[in-house]
Amino acid sequence: MHKSILSAAVVAGSLAISSGAYAADCGDISMADMNWPSATLMANVDKIILEAGYGCEVEMVVGATTVTFASMNEKGQPDVAAELWINAVREPLFAAMDEGRLHSAREMPITDLGEGWWLPPYTKEAHPELKTVLDILERPDLFPDKEDPSRGAFIGCPAGWGCQLSNQSLFIAFEMEEKGWNLIDPGSQAGLDGSIVKANERGENWFGYYWAPTSMIGKYNLQLMPFGVPFAGSENWDGCVAKGPEACTDPKPSAWT
């Protein structure tokens, strides 16, 4: 399970839908409508299929990876999450699947995806010495924080996203605070996207987290940066990095899983 996404990833153990289901058999289904584009797209397509094809009554409920997983694991609701980024919940998710509380509707995740830390192409062209994340971390002066220009701004994930914990852990692992960086919470996906748009419109340097394939990566040709260190193993990532600094205080530097 090296890649990041499971499509139609989690189905609560109490729900079973077969190709021969009748309207009377289906009944009411709750489905997580996640707060990022690909997940909300797939959830709404699934909603159409279930309602038009199987006569189900589908209720869409607001979701996000960590809170939706916790609710499905502990309460069995919502019934379905159309997409889940498992890097944030790999250990408890697989435990729940082994115990039969949750089930994957796909045998394998969607492939050819990517998470990590990115630069605009014009920043790379102007600074060819920035070949890896390790190089970037030595130059906070190139990415001044608007609230405190004496320090660099690394744009992380909004609060509540699974990747927020991973970015917080890596911020600690790479000693970024000591190197002159601030970790910025963009507040929402709109805030994250807005930071990219403003930087590109103004030709300003930008350094932060994103994932692909997405329209933002394509539109602005953002460049995924190699970390300059190897992946430090699943025990470090799943057992520490993905759990965040409250659960693990000694994360090791690592490339993204």
Image (cartoon, rainbow, N blue to C red):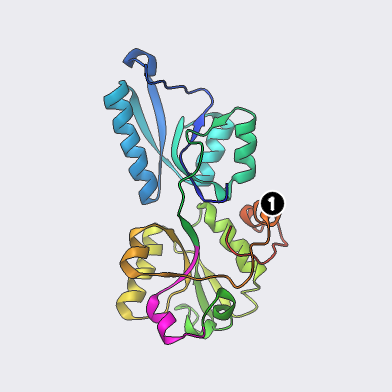
Question: Can residue 171 be seen in the rendering of this structure?
Answer: yes
Per the image, is 242 magenta?
A: no
The furthest residue to the right: 250
Relative image position of residue 108 (x, y in whole percent): 51, 41
Report which quarter residue 205 is drawn in: bottom left
Is residue 133 shown left or right of residue 98? left
213 is higher (above) or lower (below) than 150 = above
**Which SS class for mark 1?**
helix
Per the image, is 120 magenta?
A: yes
Decide: few, some or many residues near mark 1? Use Cα within 10 Å; few <14, some 14-19, many ≥20.
some
Residue at 31% in and 37% down = 45
Relative image position of residue 124 (x, y in whole percent): 44, 80
Task: Work out whether residue 100 or residue 167 is closer to the camera in this orientation and state it.
Answer: 100
Residue at 54% in and 84% down = 139
Q: Total number of numbered labels?
A: 1
The furthest residue to the left: 52
The residue at which mark 1 appears reads as 239
Give the extent of the magenta segment.
Answer: 116-129
Q: Amino acid at mark 1?
A: Gly
**In which quadrant of the rendered image does the C terminus lie?**
bottom right
Relative image position of residue 53 (x, y in whole percent): 29, 24
Residue at 33% in and 27% down = 50
Is residue 17 shown left or right of residue 14? left
Relative image position of residue 223 (x, y in whole percent): 43, 71
Residue at 32% in and 22% down = 54
141 is higher (above) or lower (below) than 201 = below
Task: Work out whether residue 128 or residue 145 is closer to the camera in this orientation and state it.
Answer: 128
The furthest residue to the top: 24
Question: Can residue 150 be seen in the rendering of this structure?
Answer: no
240 is higher (above) or lower (below) than 42 = below
